[in-house]
Amino acid sequence: MILTLRRLCGIGAVFAIFLLLCTACGGANGNQPDPSGLELPPTSVDANKLALTEDFSTEGDASKLTVTLTAESFFDLYQIAGTLAYDAESLELAGVSQGSFLGDPPEVIFFQRADDPGQIPFALTRRSISPGATGRGILLRAQFRVLTNRLPAQLVWLEEELVVRDSLRHDIRVSRPGGEER
């Protein structure tokens, strides 16, 4: 019960900061980017898709796992927030880093928490009033130490709660890893 409350508080804190960043970066009622500079949205069914890839490596007796969250075929991606979850009995978080798809600091604000084993709440948003990113690119990477030889079928996944918005702060429907749509 206490662990669940801690997770909810952690996730709530990330979303509160995300909403604060949305407001600071123009918000729903602030200045909006000029949509005339945007390309037409793609008509492909593969548009606005997220992918998780796992890459195992070994150094001496230690096994490592790098998980990459990638935006696939996106149109006007401006903000994304969610929680990357992992099996804390099999993996120990070693680090999290921002990808460059939305841009590099200081154009992008990246926030993540790693104080709750099994959960990595994160938020990425562009800082300037500009069109969002279009195409394919890396959103974030998480590095883990593998703690056991007996790994479960699912090591890392995206939690259900996911906020994805375009430069006009409209929600974007995305296809999530595993094929489900949000």
Image: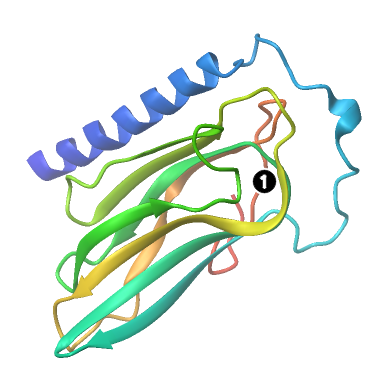
| Image position, residue 73 (x, y; %) | 73, 59
Q: Quadrant of residue 9?
A: top left
Query: SS class of the residue under badge 1?
Result: loop
Residue at numbered disc 1: 173
Q: In the picture provided, is 176 more to the left or to the right than 92?
A: right
| Quadrant, the N terminus | top left
Q: Amino acid at mark 1?
A: Arg
Q: Is residue 1 in sight in this rendering?
A: no
Q: As drawn, which residue projects farthest toward the left?
A: 2
15 versus 164 height, above or below: above
Identify which residue is drawn at 17% across, 89% down. 149
Residue at point 14%, 83% (across, down): 148
**Colouring convention used in this rendered image of the protein:** rainbow
Q: Is residue 85 above or below residue 56?
A: above
Q: Position of residue 88 (x, y in %)?
A: 18, 64
Q: Is residue 178 above or below residue 150?
A: above
Position above or below: 6 against 146 = above
In the image shown, does 34 or 8 lie closer to the viewer? Answer: 34
**112 horizontally vs 35: left or right:** left
Please state if 161 lies on the left or on the right of 135 as rendered: left
Q: Name the spot of residue 142 as percent of width and height, x first.
A: 35, 61
**Callout 1: few (<14), some (14-19), or many (20+) C-alpha neighbours within 10 Å?**
some
Q: Nearer the viewer, residue 112 or 60?
A: 60
Residue 125 image position (x, y, % from top left): 54, 34
